[in-house]
Amino acid sequence: MAPDPSHIMQVGMGFWPSKTVLSAVELELFTQLGSESLTGEEIRERLGLHPRATYDFLDTLVALRLLERDGDGSEGRYRNTQDTAAFLDKRSPTYIGGILEMCNARLYGFWGDLTEALRTGQPQNEVKQTGRAMFEELYADPARLEQFMEAMQGISLGNFHALAETFDFSKYETVCDVGGATGLLCRIVAARHPHLRCISYDLPVVAPIAERAIAADGLSDRVQVASGDFFADPLPSADVVTMGLILHDWNLDRKMHLIRSAYEALPDGGAFIVIENLIDDARRENAFGLMMSLNMLIEFGDAFDFTGGDFAGWCREVGFRDVEIRPLTGPTSAGIAYK
């Protein structure tokens, strides 16, 4: 067969569709549509678009299968697809647009400096302007911190539900989610398994955010918020210790510190569960996991994502007896180590 450049062009020009959908999320197009069907002119007025841009923008989203259109031209009416209604309308309980909002506000610009990161191994985020690392910047600004927490909540929602459904929690009584943020994992697991008592553990500045979310779900009697620094303090003891998208934020020394801390917090028979975009052991298939590792280079320099085999080796080095990898949703898996 003759060489075909189409795949190269699709990947190389991938920033075109990316920025189109990110701008649509920023403009709250999908939320404005909701369950309605609107003409291009009605959308233009609601979003404050320029006449030159309106139809190219909307019809691009139709061609990308992110909107549906009934009719043609000025009489055509645009509406959400089933997926955008579920995941990109802010009024939907399954909204995941927070991560896209953060990509638009932060990561899209930072990835423009990927070449510099590849050559230097240095982060390319806020630290270049302020000298302060990402988490220092986030924790100094309550509004940005809450945006980050909402972004992580959106990207983790489906995986936490999958874990709650597929992991056998019946033999355990307590769960501690380390780096618990809004308490989402604890809230989902506690709602699905009424016998469990859960602890959402994070820095003190995060506690009010978690407490509000837990109270709103009516789970304050079974989900406790605990505060501390997981590099300076021992973790709360529990039968199950979980970490959702935590290990990949750190270099190997700090990863090992967290794994040892989890081991020490568990009783014999306890389980340590990480939820990560685990890269396949051959490093050929999980493109999202590999690009997430590049994102960790952009954000932190020496942080990285890892394979299931890497995780199993680290856990056995610490003393865990058995390790298994379970797929969750999309590119994400649970790594489960038993003490």
Image (cartoon, rainbow, N blue to C red):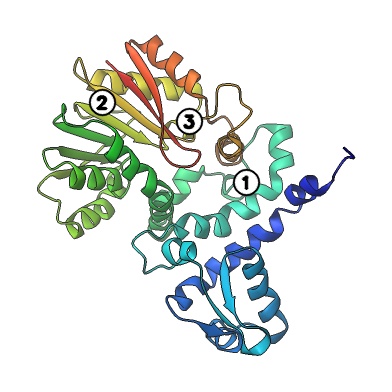
With respect to residue 268, does 37 lie above or below? Answer: below
Q: Is residue 178 visible?
A: no
Toward which corner of the image does residue 290 lie, by quadrant? top right
- Residue plotted at (38% across, 21% down): 324
Which residue lies most toward the right here? 2
* Secondary element at image label 2: loop
With 112 as the anchor, is 312 left or right in this view? Answer: left
Can you identify the residue that label 2 sits on?
234
**Residue closest to the eye, 172 or 230:** 172
Q: Where in the figure is residue 284, as x and y percent of width and height? A: 64, 28
Dot 2 or dot 1: first in sequence order is 1
Q: Could you give the CA–CA distance between mark 3 and mark 2, rounded to whole angstroms?
A: 18 Å
In the rendered view of the protein, which quadrant contains the N terminus? top right
Can you identify the residue that label 1 sits on?
128
**Residue closest to the eye, 172 or 37:** 37
Q: Is residue 104 visible?
A: yes
Amino acid, disc 3: Trp
Q: Could you give the CA–CA distance between mark 1 and mark 3, rounded to whole angstroms?
A: 19 Å
Can you identify the residue that label 3 sits on?
250
Dot 3 or dot 2: first in sequence order is 2
